[in-house]
Image (tube, helix red, strand yellow):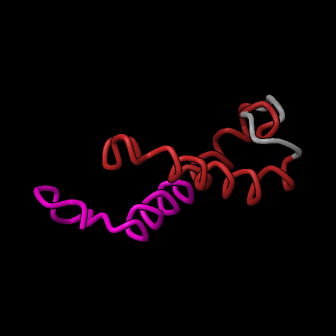
Amino acid sequence: MLGLFGGREAAPMIRELTGWFEFTYGKQYGGTSCRDITNDDPYNRITLCPALIEATYEQAKAILIENGYDLYDLNHSHT
């Protein structure tokens, strides 16, 4: 998503999102891999992953907006 909107300018935004994810979930789950977060338990995938995906999507949107991207006007998406 960040690469789609940001193109060549996406790298700093990706680093920001990665840092946010590591800070937000890395400590809580002892790492950021799927295995760390779910502890290889299929039930945890069902119960944990949807909320993490939604939160990460919302954070990515916030980063894009902070960097001047208009997510609602795709024809003129960077100010």
Quadrant for residue 28, please give it.
bottom right
Residue at left 53%, top 51%?
12
Residue 26 located left or right of residue 67: right
Q: Where residue 3 sits in the image (x, y, percent)? A: 39, 41
Magenta residues, dominant SS class: helix
Residue at left 75%, top 41%?
32
Quadrant for residue 46, please give it.
top right
Q: Quadrant of the C terminus?
A: bottom left
Whether residue 12 is in magenta: the answer is no
Q: Is residue 11 above or below residue 13?
A: above
Q: Residue furthest front?
A: 8
| Frontmost residue, 55 versus 40 | 55
Residue 40 located left or right of residue 66: right
Residue 48 located left or right of residue 72: right
Whether residue 68 is in magenta: the answer is yes
| Frontmost residue, 7 versus 75 | 7
Q: Is residue 25 above or below residue 42?
A: below
Q: Quadrant of the N terminus?
A: top left
Residue at left 76%, top 58%?
23
Count of picture labels = 0
Q: Where residue 51 sits in the image (x, y, percent)? A: 60, 56
Residue 76 located left or right of residue 28: left
Q: Where residue 37 sits in the image (x, y, percent)? A: 78, 41
| Frontmost residue, 45 versus 27 | 27
Residue at left 58%, top 53%?
17
Does the rendering let one see residue 40? yes
Does the rendering let one see residue 1? no
Quadrant for residue 4, please give it.
top left
Stretch in magenta: 54-79
